[in-house]
Every structure is written in C-alpha cells, then in structure tokens.
C-alpha cells in the first residue's frame, strides 16, 4: 500500500538504511536517476547522487537522529539530468527503530528548477534595468551641473533651488540603480573581492571625509573612538568603506538635530568590532531581523531614503569577509549597528 502511495507522489523519494544504502525509490526518483530500483538497491547513495550537501545532511540526520535544520538556501542541490542542470529542494527525515536508533532515512527531492529560473530572470532584470538607468541619469546630472555653473545662461534664485532639488533626486536614483546592480551581482555570485591588508585608521578617515560635511549641515556631532593599536585587517577596503558609509548615512537620516553619531572600533580576540551608534529614533526589536532583508523600509519611516537595499548589501559584504552584522536598538532609544571583520594574518 505504501509503495503505491509513494509512486503517486509528485516528488522523488529515496529511502536509505543507516549505512546510507538505497532501500527503496519511488517512481519519480527512478525517472530522475534514470535507473530501476533493482539497479540501485543496496548501492550507497554517494555512488548514485553527486551532491556533497545531500551527503552532509544525511550524515547529520543519522548522527543526531532528527531531521536536519534546513533553510531554503541550504536545502537546494543541483543535479544533471539528461544533460541539463536541474535544481531540487531536499528534505530528510529518519525513521527510528524501537531502541531510538535511526533505522531508515527518507529523502525527498522536489524539483524547483522553475523557481530558480524565475529568480534568475528577476536578477537579470534588475541588472539590466539598473544598468539602463545609469546612462540617462548621468547625462541629466551633467546637464544640471552645466546649468548650475552658469554655462547656459544666468540663473534665478528659484531656478537654482529647482536645479539643486533635481540634482539631489538624480543622485538618489543613481544610488538606487547602483545598489540594485550590486545586489544582482551578489545574487549571481559575481561579487569580486579585492582583498588587501587594510589600515583601519586610513579607512575610517576616508569614510568620514564626506560624511563630516553632511553631519555639520544637519547639526549632528560625529565622533570616532579608535584605540591606538589596531592591527591591519584583510579586507576589500572600498567595500568596507561602503558598509560604514551606509551605516553612518542611515544614522544621519534617523538622528534629529543636536544628536550624535559615534564610530567605534575595538579588538576582541581575532576579530575587530566596528560599531556605528546614533541617538536617533531607534528600531523596534521586532524589526531587527527584517531590516537586513531586501527592499525593507519600516512602515513608520517617512524619510526620503533609498530603496531599502543598503543593509542587505552590508550584510553580504560583511559575510563575504567572514564577519557578522547585527543591530541593538529600541524605539526612541538610539541605534547601534555592529559588524565584525577578522584581523589580518600579518
Ligand atoms: N540608524 C537607524 N535608525 C533608525 N532606523 C534605521 C537606521 N538604520 C536603518 N534603519 C531602518 O532600516 C531600513 C533599512 O535600511 P537600509 O540601509 O537597508 O535602507 P535605506 O537606507 O532605507 O535605503 P538604501 O540604503 O537602499 O539607500 C531603513 O529604511 C530604516 O527604516
Ligand atoms: Mg541605507
């Protein structure tokens, strides 16, 4: 009866014993592997399917006697089928014997190739749309620059105000286009890191050079707290400057006049902890995880921000360096973003 049931299921099912040898396959799995049950019975799953992730999860299931903890990202494997690459979402569950030992492991494979293709189309669309936006925006900015410089005739006071508004909106759009391009590059694994030994003092100085002016304009004090003996870090300096700029940029946006922002670096063991602390409006705890996701801007936030991509990119960059990023904040309590970067070897 079970066999019939398994054969009717739309997903592929493989059952192995505790030695990871194939006990049974349903019809869909036979199609997927282009093999009959008789051909593969008793074969180790490793000889049948080449997917290190599947083997690691199978080991984990057998060692801990429970289904492995899976997220969408870490449960997708790619398999070649009739010359084409297809993607499968896998899940595993052990069946325990009377003495609580895992006896069999049920592995299911759901074909998610269509989802992967849609994801890819979306990423490609972002990449080409943002690329297409850049050229006209850049020429608008050039035109505005020429007008502001008086190259096309005298400007009235009102004319200058309007041009300045156009310029800042264009710059904002350009920033969004750049972020979209960056995100799509990261999603396709095309984030090229140029790692070098980095002097943290120089890096912070370069970051704050442009932000100081903005802080002065907004009447916000900008402090740095750097101990005198910070080691070099191994990093892509421009990318870390980008992270710090986005964090301080956010802090500037959410801190009222008269407030302060402190950029601090400390060393703990093999990590440097970079933090950006503000005295602004704060972020409610239930939103802490959310803000690192794509296109998230909080509902009660009516400031003219970007597209809600900054923190997503920060997270990708920090993780690509082997670090972590998190936030500590409460509503009306100010906010501290902290990220870690490993200390360099030299
Ligand atoms: N220091 C902060 N204080 C209060 N809220 C913040 C702070 N930093 C971030 N946020 C909240 O998190 C959201 C996401 O920030 P993120 O940097 O990802 O996007 P953004 O700044 O709105 O746009 P982008 O960075 O793409 O230009 C912000 O829109 C804001 O609601
Ligand atoms: Mg931002």
Image: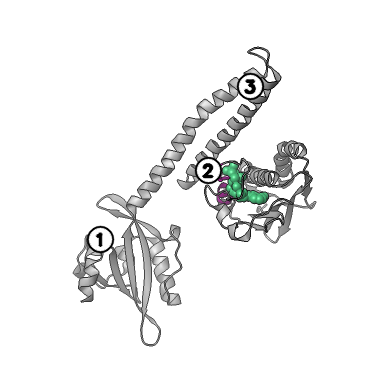
- Expressed as whole percent of the image width and height from the top left, the position of residue 149 reads 68, 18
Q: Tell me the quarter of the picture where residue 104 sits.
A: bottom left
Tell me, yes or no, whether the highlighted magenta stretch contains residue 312. yes
Taking the spot 44% from the left edge, 35% from the top edge, the residue there is 128
Measure how far apart labels 3 and 1 are at the Cα level.
Answer: 62 Å
Element under disc 3: helix
Q: Which mark is residue 33?
A: 1
Question: Do the residues bearing badges 3 and 1 touch, measured as CB atoms within 8 Å?
Answer: no
Q: Is residue 190 above or below residue 289?
A: above
* Apparent side of residue 265 relative to residue 234 in the rendered image (left or right): right
Q: Residues within 10 Å of mark 1 (few under 14, many from 20)?
A: some
Q: Is residue 162 above or below residue 334?
A: above
- Expressed as whole percent of the image width and height from the top left, the position of residue 277 reads 72, 52
Q: How many marks?
A: 3
Q: Nearer the viewer, mark 3 or mark 1?
A: 3
Tell which residue pokes out farthest to the bottom in this image. Answer: 99
Q: Is residue 5 above or below residue 111?
A: below
Residue at image mark 2: 192
Does the numbered disc 1 mark a residue whose Cβ is under 8 Å from ligand 1?
A: no
Does the numbered disc 2 mark a residue whose Cβ is under 8 Å from ligand 1?
A: no
Query: Which secondary structure class fits the magenta region best?
Result: helix
Magenta stretch in the rendered image: 307-316
Taking the spot 43% from the left edge, 43% from the top edge, the residue there is 123
> Sequence-wise, which precedes: disc 2 or disc 1?
1
């Amino acid at each position: 009866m079970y066999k019939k049931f398994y054969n009717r299921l739309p997903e592929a099912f493989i059952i192995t014993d505790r030695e990871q040898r194939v006990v049974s396959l349903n019809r869909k799995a036979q199609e997927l592997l282009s093999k009959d049950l008789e051909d593969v019975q008793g074969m180790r799953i490793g000889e049948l399917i080449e997917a290190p992730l599947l083997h690691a999860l199978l080991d984990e299931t057998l060692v801990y006697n429970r289904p492995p903890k899976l997220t969408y990202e870490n449960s997708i494997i790619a398999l070649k089928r009739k010359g084409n690459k297809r993607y499968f979402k896998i899940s595993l569950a052990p069946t325990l014997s009377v003495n609580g030992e895992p006896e069999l492991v049920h592995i299911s494979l759901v074909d998610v190739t269509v989802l992967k293709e849609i994801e890819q189309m979306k990423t490609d669309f972002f990449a080409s749309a943002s690329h297409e936006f850049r050229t006209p925006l850049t020429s608008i900015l050039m035109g505005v620059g020429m007008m502001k410089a008086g190259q096309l005739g005298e400007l009235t006071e009102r004319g200058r105000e309007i041009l300045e508004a156009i310029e800042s909106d264009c710059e904002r759009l350009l920033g969004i286009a750049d972020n979209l391009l960056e995100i799509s590059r990261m999603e396709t694994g095309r984030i090229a890191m140029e790692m070098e030994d980095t002097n943290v003092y120089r890096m912070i100085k370069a970051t704050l050079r442009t932000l100081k002016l903005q802080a002065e304009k907004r009447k916000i004090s900008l402090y740095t707290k750097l101990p005198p003996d910070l080691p070099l870090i191994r990093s892509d300096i421009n990318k870390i400057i980008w992270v710090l700029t986005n964090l301080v940029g956010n802090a500037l946006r959410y801190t009222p006049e008269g407030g302060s922002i402190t950029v601090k670096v400390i060393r703990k063991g093999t990590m440097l902890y970079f933090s950006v602390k503000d005295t602004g409006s704060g972020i409610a705890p239930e939103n802490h995880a959310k803000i690192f996701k794509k296109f998230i801007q909080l509902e009660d936030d009516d400031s003219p921000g970007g597209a809600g991509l900054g923190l997503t990119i920060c997270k990708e960059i920090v993780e690509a360096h082997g670090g972590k990023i998190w936030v500590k904040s409460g509503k009306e309590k100010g906010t501290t973003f902290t990220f870690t970067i490993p200390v360099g070897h030299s």
